Every structure is written in structure tokens, then in C-alpha cells.
Amino acid sequence: MNRDGALLYRGKMEEVISQRLIVSVSPHIRAREDVRTIMSDVIFALSPALGASIIFFGWRALLIVSVSIFFSVASEFFWQKLWRKKITVGDLSPVVTGMLLAFVLPPSSPLWMVAIGAFVAITLGKQIFGGLGYNPFNPALVARAVLLASWPVYMTTWTKPFDGVTTASPLGIVKMELDQRLPSYLEMFLGNRAGCLGEISVLALLLGAIYLLYRKQITWHIPVSYIGTVGLVCLLFNRDPLFNIMAGGLILGAFFMATDLVTSPLTRRGKLVFGVGCGLLTVLIRFTGGFPEGVCYSILIMNMLTPIIDKITEPKVFGS
Amino acid sequence: MKRLFSFKGGVHPPYFKELTSGQPLRRASLPKKVVIPLSQHTGRPAKPIVEVGDEVKTGQLIGESDGFISLPIHSSLSGKVLDIKPWPHPLGHTVLSVIVESDGRDEWISDLTAHEDYFRLSPEEIREIVNSAGIAGLGGAAFPTHVKLTPPESCEIDTVILNGCECEPYLTCDHKLMLEYSQEILEGLRIIMQTVDADRGIIGVEANKTDVISLLEKELRREPGIKLAVLKVKYPQGAEKHLIDAVLKRKVPPGKLPLDVGVMVDNVGTALAIRQAVKRGIPLIERVVTVTGSGIKQPQNLWVRLGTLFADVVSQCGGLLGNPEKIIAGGPMMGIAQYTLDIPLIKGTSGILILSEAETFPEGDCIRCGKCIDVCPVNLMPTVIAQHVQHTDWASVRRYSPFDCMECGACAYVCPVKIPLVQYIKWGKEEVKERE
């Protein structure tokens, strides 16, 4: 058959196409975006919060972030070398993990603890399950949970912005009913309060969040349902909703942790369920639990439910 | 700004239409021979009624329709039947084909029956004319048009939509047709409306074809029953069910047809072919094809006789530019990659796309971003289906409705880790079908 065709079309044309043609299933064009583009967008979106942490906690904040990123990338690299897997650090996902981990650590964290955290995030949080895409839990939050259980004192020592004097976190003040001044709404909005490195400035976080929404790397569903649920429950139980939204790690968690692609549900309806669940668990822990803050655990718990949420929120086929 | 009609989901691939949209529509010179496959439509192949050595004329019947869902095939040249044998087909298998060597005279059959007064014809008569002219849907699926024009008694069709969206990147053949044959296409639409007794006609055009839109706006002033619907530029805007949803807000349920919601959709090229068959008696022996891509010297739209080999079409466009890496019959989103240029052009071939640099995409692991689900116009979960296919868990594949997938490719297009989702879904469909 082929030979017949070739015989009839001897000459220049045949010469040219005698080389191999690529034969593959459609579509034959693909969008430019890959994992690296997505991660670059997230890094760019986190940079205002990084700037805020440097302003309020000094250059040590940058040091902690750098150590965390360095050990995340190094852990990923050596793990993949060790198991003779393809080296994928170029996709920048360990950089994001490193940044996010540093953002949920206190500014006075010892550097060796940061390094251990980064190692735990990459190995126990991600690579042990098979790498990016297979990890059931948010790696940065897994590391935070491990550090909190291992070095609770370091993980709950808070310092005031600018002077570094030890103080309580705003949520801690409320929880322990301490006789200390709570930061004003404006101070919390700008980030002038005690807290984890990256969680303090609502303004900086929102700037990054707007960028991620604009670039369609996240959708509104998880942050809105998460923050909305927290606000609504606060109203119902007569707590200050604005304070509860801005005082802890909620803004960072809702826009940058709960929206983690791998560990959140696939569908938009699933994302709404996920966000409401995170919101309910967060207020449950804050109001009735032993810890002043519940964002980290609530997201980790909802991560566990993601496969089930995916199953029950399958979208309806067009027209049915 | 006026609000444009649209649907939920979809993607925005680069269009590359300017390669050909500015070039005039030309007529290709006659090839020395044509290879006419006896199956160029959905349904049973035609049965050959000529023998090797026979003299045939242009428009002469050479393959007889075999049953209701089938179509007759006509010779697209005058000359001699060289051979009747299987030949590679753009859909990927070999098909019994009639090879006609041109005598260079293009002598037509003498008994073309023209019906200038088509409005006197009954629906049955029109269907018969459309059937014997061998008309299939020219948008790509190539479903026999007379079957479509025969809705069951229980279905009342109130609206006929002409599909002029042309959402596939690179392709401009429908665009060119609408510009140069607008009146004939409108006449075709009226014939279709008359046949299925619908009183409303709509032409759907994507907003990027501004010249077509202003032309049609002018011409439709004299046509009270026909309206223009300008649609948002988005892929796959031209998908039948989504065009209906966008324009009429009617949703065709899974497994149902447009006629179940009282609508019929035809491609603009099909409407032109119907008009030519009814009013002038001409069977379907040629079509407009967009020859384009980075690997062709002079990209353009050409009227080409059916059965012309891609190689002949390419040499009419100045030949290849550099070494091609991929040759596609159709557009880049749904077209079929070919392994040779010795492939005949058939009724459903809307484009010949030649890419001098075709990327191959190594497949990564799903990062569960959900973008494939967001863009799926049918609301499927492509990555979940693909995962079950990878695990050869066919029962689970079935549960996620793979048969509702129209293989538009939007999911695979957006996937950041380049999973060949359409390939997995096609595979899944085959395996599930085999087990039922």
C-alpha cells in the first residue's frame, strides 16, 4: 500500500517525507503552562508577605526563609538521587514548600529546627508518598505539626515586631485571657503584631492572593468558603469575626495552604465543601480546643477527607 | 459592548487564523488522478458500481449507497478507472477506494437536474436529492445529511442553526465560504428550514470574524426569519450541543440528539452543498480545505476535488517549507495525525495542517490542579478517568461517563503536566465497549 503510494509520488516530495512523521492522538497543541509556571506564580504571590516579614521581624526573617528553601530543595534533590528518580527540583515546588514552611514558623525559630522542618516536609510530607501529586497532606503543614509536637516551646515563642521582645500572640491573649493589649484592626491589617513569619500582614497576603486569582492558579471557592465560615460562626457565637479572621494564620491558610492543588478537592463544589469544613474545624479548635490556633490542623484533617469529597462531588454531565 | 453568546468551560488556544484568513479562496487545478474512498461518511461504505478500465465522467455515480445510514459516492473527475483497491484513509485505516486517472477534460455528466424553484419541492423530494448528491456533514463528523433531515414524527423542529463558529485554530475554510458564498449559504439554510418545517433560522459566528458579521448583518435585513448569533471566541464553541446551549439556552441531555430539543445544526459548508445539489443538481465532489501551518510555503484556502491526495494539494500551495514533523487532517485540537501525504482528501477534511516543528510532550504525574475538570465543556473528570484507565479498572472508567466525552481536547490542552487525557479516554471507551 505504502509502496504503491510512494511509487506514484516518487521525486522530491517523497524524499522529503521519507523521514519520520510524528503520529499522536489529538490535541496537537498544548498550553504553555507547566508546573514551573504555576510554582513561579505562587512564589511571586508570596513575595509581598516575605517583604512584610522582613519589615516587621528584620533580616532574620529572610534568613529563616532562605534556610527553609535551601533544605527543602536539598532534601528533594538528595532523596531523588538516592532512589535514582528523575530530579525534578527545577519545577520549583520544593521552593514553594520551603517558603510556606518558613511562613508558619515563629520568627525566633532556631535555624537547625527550620532545617529539620524542611527535611521533614519534603521527605515525610511529600517524597515518601511518591512525590508531587501523590502526597495526601500539605507538606509544609505536616512539617509544622511535627515541629510543634517535637519542640513546643520554640514553636510557641512569639516576639513583637521591630524590637524582638517576647510576647503572646493575639489569639493566645484571647485564649489565655491574658491582660495584654490586643493589636488594632489596622495593625493586624498591616502586619504589626506577633505571629508566624508570613501570616502577619493581611494586606501583603491579599495582594498575593489577588495575583493568584487573576492568574487563575487558585479559584475563589476555598478561601471564600473557609473565611466566610469562620466569620459566620463568629457572628453566631458572638465573637469578633474581623479579629478572628485577621489575628491568626487564617488568611495565609485560606489562600495559600488550603488551596494547595495536590491536597485539595478537584471540583469546584468539592472545594466549597472543603472550605466550609476547614472553617468549622478552625473555630472548633480555637474556641473549644487546647490550642489558641486551629488553621494548621483543620487543613490537615480536611486533606484526609479530600478523596471522599472528590467522590461525592462529581459534577453532573452536561445536559443531565 | 453587546453580550456574546457562550457556554461554560472551554479554552483559549492561539488561533493562527491570520495565516490563511487574508488569502483569497482559490480553485485548485485538477489533479492527474484521484483516490476516492468508498467510505467518506459515518455509516456503511458505498458499494462500487464501476470496474477497472471503465470511463467515468465528473459527477458520475461510482459507489452505491448501502442502506439508510450510508451515502453514494461520485467521481470527482472525468477519466478512466485505474484500480479499485484498499488505500490509506485519513481516519487511520485502509478503505476500498476507486482510483480515477484524469483525462484532463473534466467532462460532467449531462443529466444534472436543477430545481430553480426549490420551494415547490416536498421534504421527501429534497431529502432524496440531498441523499443522491452524497452530502455528508462537512464540519468534520461527516454524518449523512439526509438522515439528519429525516427527524422522527414525534420530534418537532422549530429552529435550524447554521454552524459558522469555526473554533478550531488554524482553520478558515468556513470563514472564507461565508464571505464569498453568503447568499448561497442563506439559500441552503432556507432549504433546510423548509425540509424540516422550522420557522426560525440562526447563523452562529464567532466574534473574531468581523467581516462575516458585518456582511451577514447587511444581508439578513432582508431575511425576517433568519438571525445572526455572535458568539464568544472560545474553543469548542462550535460543538453542536454547546452551540445550542449558547444560542438557545437549551441543553441536549447525554445520549440525546439536538432534534430531541427541537433543533437541527448544520455546518455552513453543508448548507452550501445542499443548495448546490437542490438548485443546480451538483453532487458533492469538491470542498474547501484550509491548507496551513508552519510547514507550508503558501498557506491558503482551496476548492479541491474529493479524492485529491494531500501531496497534490500541498504542491498547489508552493510545496513544503522545510521538513514536516507532523501532518494533520483537520485542525490541531481534533485533527488526525497522518503518516504520509499519500492520503486522499475526503468529505470531512476541513484542513491540511503541516507543522514543521511538532512538539512532543513527555507525560508527567497528575498534580490534581483540576484544570481539566474546569475546562471540560461536558463536565467530566478527565484526570479521574485517565487514572482509572492507567489502573485498567474498567468498571470505574465506566462510572465516570467516558462516552459523553466528545474528545474536543480542551482537557489535554490545558494540562500542565501534559497527560494525554484524550488518548486515555479513547482507550477507556474501547475497553469498556469491548466488555459490554
Image: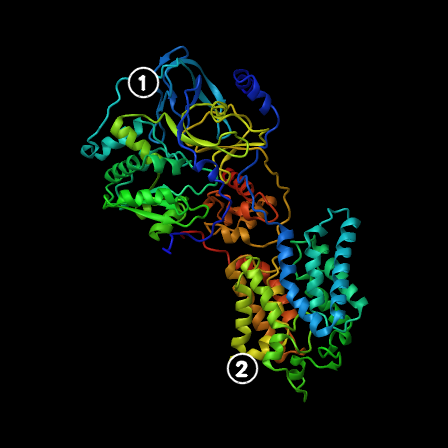
Neighbours of disc 1 within 10 Å: few (<14), some (14-19), many (20+): some
Image quadrant containing the N terminus of chain B: bottom left
* B430 horizontally vs A42: left or right: left
- Residue B229 in percent (x, y) is at 34, 48
Determine the CA span between mark 1 and mark 2.
87 Å
Q: Is residue B420 visible?
A: yes
Q: Is B211 located above or below residue A282 in the figure?
A: above
The residue marked by circle 2 belongs to what chain?
Answer: A
In the rendering, which numbered label is found on residue A237?
2
* B404 horizontally vs B248: left or right: right
Neighbours of disc 2 within 10 Å: few (<14), some (14-19), many (20+): few
**Residue located at (34% from left, 35% from top):** B180
- Residue B281 in percent (x, y) is at 27, 26
Residue B171: image quadrant is: top left
- Residue B148 in percent (x, y) is at 32, 37
- Residue B243 in percent (x, y) is at 38, 47
Helix, strand or loop at label 1? It is loop
The residue marked by circle 1 belongs to what chain?
Answer: B
Q: Is B213 located above or below residue B337 in the figure?
A: below
In the rendering, which numbered label is found on residue B108?
1
Of residues A259 and B29, the one nearer the viewer is: B29
Q: Amino acid at mark 1?
A: Trp
**Residue located at (61% from left, 48% from top):** B417
Q: Is residue B155 visible?
A: no
Residue B263: image quadrant is: top left
